[in-house]
Image (cartoon, rainbow, N blue to C red):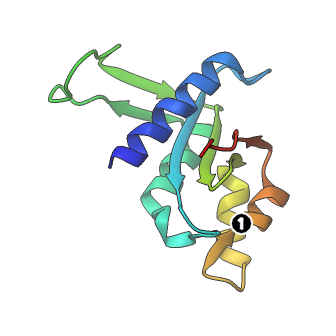
């Protein structure tokens, strides 16, 4: 859980410093792996459906829980015709893959997981991470 929170914070800072041009709104599903592949099953069908709704003509309406802790920017979010990404952190880099491209890869791949190499090939954006000093 701490790793996931650390990646969420890293991605949030990166996105703030590197706004996506020509994107007025976006939905992100963040995943990470410590290995060289991520099982397609790590992104659940309902998550892909929600991302598809965000970039679709009917849109995605999401009520933010009143039970959430800390700062809550608003009560509800509505995304329509927005960009939607699966963001995957592999060792040494993370990449932004369009949710529709990820869904197509999941449906057509002969593999049960998305390798780091293939993720680089289908990603819209690849961000190299600095090597940790020992």
Instruction: Give the residue drawn at x 41%, y 46%.
Output: 4
Q: Position of residue 49 (x, y in %)?
A: 51, 54
Q: In this figure, what is the number of numbered marks?
A: 1
Query: Could you say whether the residue bearing mark 1 is in a helix, strand or loop?
Result: helix
100 sits left or right of 78 in the view: right
Where 63 sits versus 16, above or below? below
Q: Position of residue 11 (x, y in %)?
A: 57, 33
**Extreme-left residue of the structure:** 67
Instruction: Give the residue drawn at x 70%, y 47%.
Output: 95
The residue to which callout 1 is attached is: 104
Instruction: Give the residue drawn at x 73%, y 78%.
Output: 108
**Extreme-right residue of the structure:** 121
Where 63 sits versus 86, above or below? above
**Extreme-front residue of the structure:** 134
Which one is nearer the viewer's eye here, 53 or 2? 2
Which one is nearer the viewer's eye here, 97 or 82? 97
Instruction: Give the residue drawn at x 72%, y 79%.
Output: 109
Q: Position of residue 39 (x, y in %)?
A: 55, 72
Q: Quadrant of residue 104?
A: bottom right
Where 50 sits versus 14, above or below? below
Q: Residues within 10 Å of mark 1 (few under 14, many from 20)?
A: few
98 sits left or right of 52 in the view: right
Q: Position of residue 40 (x, y in %)?
A: 56, 70
Where 58 sits versus 79, above or below? below
93 sits left or right of 72 in the view: right
Which one is nearer the viewer's eye here, 113 or 45? 113
């Amino acid at each position: 859980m701490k790793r996931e929170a650390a990646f969420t914070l890293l991605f949030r800072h990166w996105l703030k410093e590197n706004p996506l041009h020509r994107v007025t709104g976006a939905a992100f599903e963040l995943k990470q792996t410590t290995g060289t592949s991520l099982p397609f099953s790590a992104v659940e069908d309902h998550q892909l459906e929600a991302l598809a709704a965000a970039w679709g003509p009917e849109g995605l309406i999401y009520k933010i829980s009143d039970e959430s802790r800390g700062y809550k920017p608003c009560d509800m979010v509505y995304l329509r015709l927005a960009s939607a990404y699966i963001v995957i952190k592999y060792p040494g880099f993370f990449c932004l893959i369009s949710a529709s491209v990820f869904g197509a890869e999941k449906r057509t791949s002969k593999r049960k997981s998305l390798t780091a190499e293939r993720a680089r090939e289908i990603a819209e954006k690849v961000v190299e991470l600095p090597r940790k000093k020992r």
